[in-house]
Image (cartoon, rainbow, N blue to C red):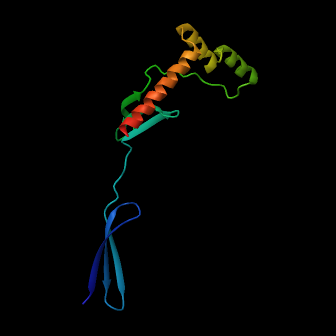
Amino acid sequence: MDDVKVEKIFMEDGRSAEKFITDDGETRVVELHVEEARPKHLAKRIVEKRKPIVYEREIQTLNEAGEVVDRVVETIDPENTMVPVADTVTKADLNEAVAALSVVKEPKVHMQSFMDQKMESSGVSKQDMIWWAVVVVQFAAMAYLIWK
């Protein structure tokens, strides 16, 4: 009697199939029963426009004939004002752009001069500040010794 073994497999194109193997000792017969090929049609197309991030996405729904039936546009900026950029930029163009920015630099302020101005405006001299610092350190040392 023939020995029939059945295996379920998947073809290279993703279709499922059953493999029937019949072996009677002298001959081996392998039969593949494959499901019918399913036709595929384009149902939806998504077009994403991006710079560093996606800023506009267009979703198109198509019918059986491949014609666009519905179109939805999702965008971050509804008034996209993109300006085409020239392929080459010259040094003169860069100099004009930098000159147009005209960045104003603030003068550097040194901490010592800043503190001197604050102390003069408050009416407290440096010697008074030093005495107050000594008093605070003494109180801190005494509190440490008491609670230790």
Left or right? Give the position of 84 relative to 142.
right
Q: State the quadrant of the C terminus.
A: top left
In the rendered view, tell whether residue 34 sits above or below residue 51: below
Residue at horizontal 53 percent and vertical 20 percent from the top? 131
Against 9, residue 97 (above or below) is: above
Vertical placement of residue 44 versus 130, above or below = below
State the residue lying farthest toward the left.
Answer: 1
Q: Where is residue 78 in the image (x, y as percent from the top left)?
A: 43, 21
Q: In which quarter of the image is the N terminus?
A: bottom left
Is residue 127 or residue 19 the one in the foreground?
127
**Residue 146 placement: quadrant:** top left
Measuring 63% from the left and 25% from the top, which residue is drawn there? Answer: 85
The foreground one among 30 and 107 is: 107
Given residues 106 and 56, the one toward you in this image is: 106
Q: Position of residue 77 (x, y in %)?
A: 44, 23
Pinpoint residue 20: horizontal percent, then vertical percent.
30, 76
Residue 143 at x, y percent in the picture: 40, 32
| Residue 137 appearing in the image | yes
